[in-house]
Image: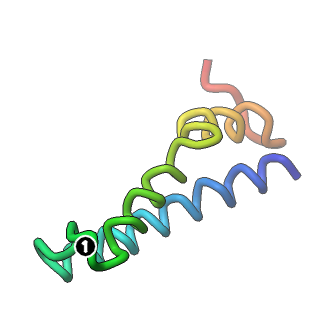
Amino acid sequence: MAAEANMGKWLAGQAVALATDRAMQTQGGMGLSKEYRVERLWRDARLLKFAPVSEEMVLNYVAQYDPGMLRSY
């Protein structure tokens, strides 16, 4: 169950980062303007990639504890 939760967190972080990056790319320079909410969403999306644990820690946990996966060392 913990591996699925970790992978869900990782996948959600990837999806929201891609979506906000595309929104900023679409708006161009105005994507950084505070009058639009995209810059705030972009900062929040960036936070999801490393809080409360980093992507590397999530992937390490899944690789180490997911049943059926062999250790690479």
> Which amino acid does the dot numbered 1 rest on?
Met
Which corner quadrant of the image does residue 7 belong to?
bottom right
Locate residue 19, reporting x and y percent: 40, 74
Who's the residue at 83% across and 42% down the image?
A: 67
Of 50 and 6, nearer the camera is 50
Who's the residue at 53% across and 59% down the image?
A: 13
- Asked if 26 appears above or below 43 in the picture, the reply is below
In the image as oriented, which residue stretches furthest toward the front? Answer: 35
Locate residue 15, reporting x and y percent: 49, 68
Q: How many marks?
A: 1
Left or right for 6, reference 72? right
- Quadrant (top left/top right/bottom left/bottom right) for the C terminus: top right
Who's the residue at 21% across and 66% down the image?
A: 32
Label 1: state its secondary structure. helix
Of 39 and 23, nearer the camera is 39
Of 60 and 70, nearer the camera is 60
Who's the residue at 88% across and 52% down the image?
A: 1
In the image as oriented, which residue stretches furthest toward the top? Answer: 73
Locate residue 59, reporting x and y percent: 61, 40
Left or right for 4, reference 55? right
Which corner quadrant of the image does residue 56 belong to?
top right
Locate residue 37, reporting x and y percent: 37, 76
Left or right for 57, reference 67? left
Of 29 and 15, nearer the camera is 29
Q: Dot 1 surroundings within 10 Å: few (below 14), some, or many (20 or more)?
A: some
Q: Which residue is mark 1?
A: 24
In the image as oriented, which residue stretches furthest toward the left? Answer: 29
